[in-house]
Image (cartoon, coloured by chain):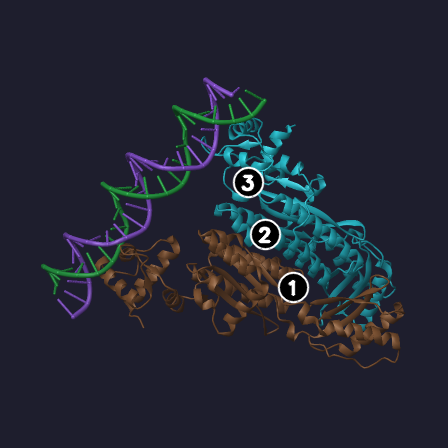
Chain colours: A brown, B cyan, C green, D purple
Amino acid sequence: MLDERKAAILRAVVEEYIDTAQPVGSGHVARAPGVDVSSATVRNEMASLEADGYLRQPHTSAGRVPTEKGYRFFVDHLRAPARLQGRSAEEVRDFFARAHGEVEHMLAETSRLLSNLTNLTSVVVSPLPAEATLRSVQVVSLTATSALVVAVFSDGMVDKHTIELPAGAGEERLAAASAHLTAHLGGSRRQVPGAVTPTGDRATDALVAAAVEVLSMAPVEDPEHVYVGGTARMAQAFDAIETVREVLGILEQQFVVVSLLRDVIDRGLHVAIGTETGMAPLAECAIVVAPYDLEGERAGTIGVLGPTRMNYPQALAAVAVVSHRLSDRLTEG
Amino acid sequence: MLDERKAAILRAVVEEYIDTAQPVGSGHVARAPGVDVSSATVRNEMASLEADGYLRQPHTSAGRVPTEKGYRFFVDHLRAPARLQGRSAEEVRDFFARAHGEVEHMLAETSRLLSNLTNLTSVVVSPLPAEATLRSVQVVSLTATSALVVAVFSDGMVDKHTIELPAGAGEERLAAASAHLTAHLGGSRRQVPGAVTPTGDRATDALVAAAVEVLSMAPVEDPEHVYVGGTARMAQAFDAIETVREVLGILEQQFVVVSLLRDVIDRGLHVAIGTETGMAPLAECAIVVAPYDLEGERAGTIGVLGPTRMNYPQALAAVAVVSHRLSDRLTEG
DNA sequence: GTTAGCACTCGGTACAATCGACTGCTACCC
DNA sequence: GGGTAGCAGTCGATTGTACCGAGTGCTAAC
């Protein structure tokens, strides 16, 4: 553990570096509020902090830069939980006041909001629909030989799958199949049972079986949705174009992004810094995440992604407030 | 119009520049196949091409670089319509052979395919559903006070909207409303009429009216979908990070992207180069687009976006082949 | 009309000198 | 003993200079 003075110096270095992106010298730190010693003393302490792995010197005769360990200490020992700035708080309030429409639409907009608030790239993962129950199944003919199986879940999600129409399936059979499916599958979870009791009518049963088949393989087809916003801000954060390219490459792989966020949450973290993310291309990035609830249950995750020298207090505050408000909005609306 | 020799020289400059991204000198051009004159002659011709605005000199003692006008001439006078490379053609065939699932899913995958084929950023705009007719409307209760209105269209698209449930709307009323809505709206276009003949039952009519209201304002809520893929490749194309940032900023505004593509198509173009795109931040970009059909009607648009020095023959071939195959797949499947 | 040859231009690179923002260390002070 | 002032030293960044080479325009010869 660091004594109070070392902590204050480390804090000053991190804050200054976040602000300027330049190595921080002892002079600047000595001038910082909360540090009331001379630059010489600061130098001694910084040498000690470097020995302990909190700081790093890009080269002799340069200032210090925080290491991952340094950032980690910084976020673990933030003074106040940090409220959102006046303007930003207002923006969030306005947003949720006029938020409306379907869940998907709102999540997409939320991603935009987060990105605007933090000036970082944002990620919103849609709810894991494990908790939702099936409310209705409808088979609607499209052409003479194909139909659409539409399943409505209690959380407002809709799954759809095209099927080939078995021969001899008239409108009345479609209606019968729809009614039968809704009656027998209604209330079940996303994982639909593999078979349903027969209706007695041969052609209807063929329809029902086809519908059940596509419904039961739903999870493969339709993974959780990810809304990524503000990728352009990634290009501002780094001046090495190669880094930008790598990070964008990661962001394009939705599956990777989802498991990244889930992984961080599962480890009980709110912040993952550099290699803590477990992904090599994100060595120079950090993510700040928070889960959001739907009807009291953990549903999805929101987060922001930026350079390790992001403004952590601001990002934490934004993510926390938005996840909170989003939870409220989703369960009440 | 350019004589044959000037055209050959211009072509050589463009091809070399696309390949190397370096200003092209007279020596390289003289050595190019199809140009059988000395470098001195090439110099004279290049000076003339520069005077006519086809080429540009970054500085006095540098080689030449094509201008927008130069690229334009190049694409307008391509020798062969250019088939796709062996490997790529195979990739496209494989893709459409195993393509399956819903339209949305296929379009998203198509975007990935295009991006892989061309090594550029790709854009796929989903079909304008003007031609689709309404097949079924279903009102499904979610909670005690809210329900979901699910509309199924003949092209397999599904619209959904949550509504507040009027008091006293039991399951049987929901069913009645669903049946009534399907009966009276079935066959209509995306633009739903503002009112429907009453059923005679007060509570059911309230439900029907609420459903019709959200359905008729559908276009505002749910604009055409855009699938953008391979944004990471944008970061490879430019070394000025500022350019990357601006272009990514554009790509995040779905509405802008949609109207950009539509605008190009409407002008009867397949390629828009630099300022031809009409967007200042895309001054260093070019786009190659093609419409695709659904049941014989123009439906949506696909395209690629890259630097003005992209490989036009390859991009044109890829976009053409993919749009063609996609049209086939959509109308047959 | 084409081409060889030549003088000239100018960006890029390599190298040296200088500058300045740092550091570590030592000596001194309370 | 802990804190501090002062000083010598380090090293990236900047500036200046010389040079190289790719490429040009022009002229004279074929």
* Helix, strand or loop status at disc 3: helix
State which chain disc 3 sits on. B
State which chain disc 1 sits on. A
Q: Nearer the viewer, mark 3 or mark 1?
A: 3
Q: Mark yes or no: residue B283 visible.
A: no
Along the viewing direction, whichever of B333 and A89 lies nearer the viewer? B333
Q: Position of residue D4 (x, y in %)?
A: 18, 58
State which chain disc 2 sits on. B
**What separation in Å lies between label 2 and label 1 (alpha carbons)?**
34 Å
Q: Position of residue A4 (x, y in %)?
A: 29, 68
Residue shown at the point (58%, 44%) measured from the top left = B310
The residue beneath circle 3 is B16
For the residues bearing labels 3 and 1, Cβ distance under 8 angstroms: no
The residue beneath circle 1 is A103
User: Which of the 4 image quadrants contains residue B280?
Assistant: top right
Pointers 2 and 1 within a single chain: no
Going by the numbered disc 1, the residue's amino acid type is Val
The residue beneath circle 2 is B119
Residue shown at the point (80%, 52%) measured from the top left = B131
* Helix, strand or loop status at disc 1: helix
Are there few (<14), some (14-19), or many (20+) residues within 10 Å of tag 2?
A: many
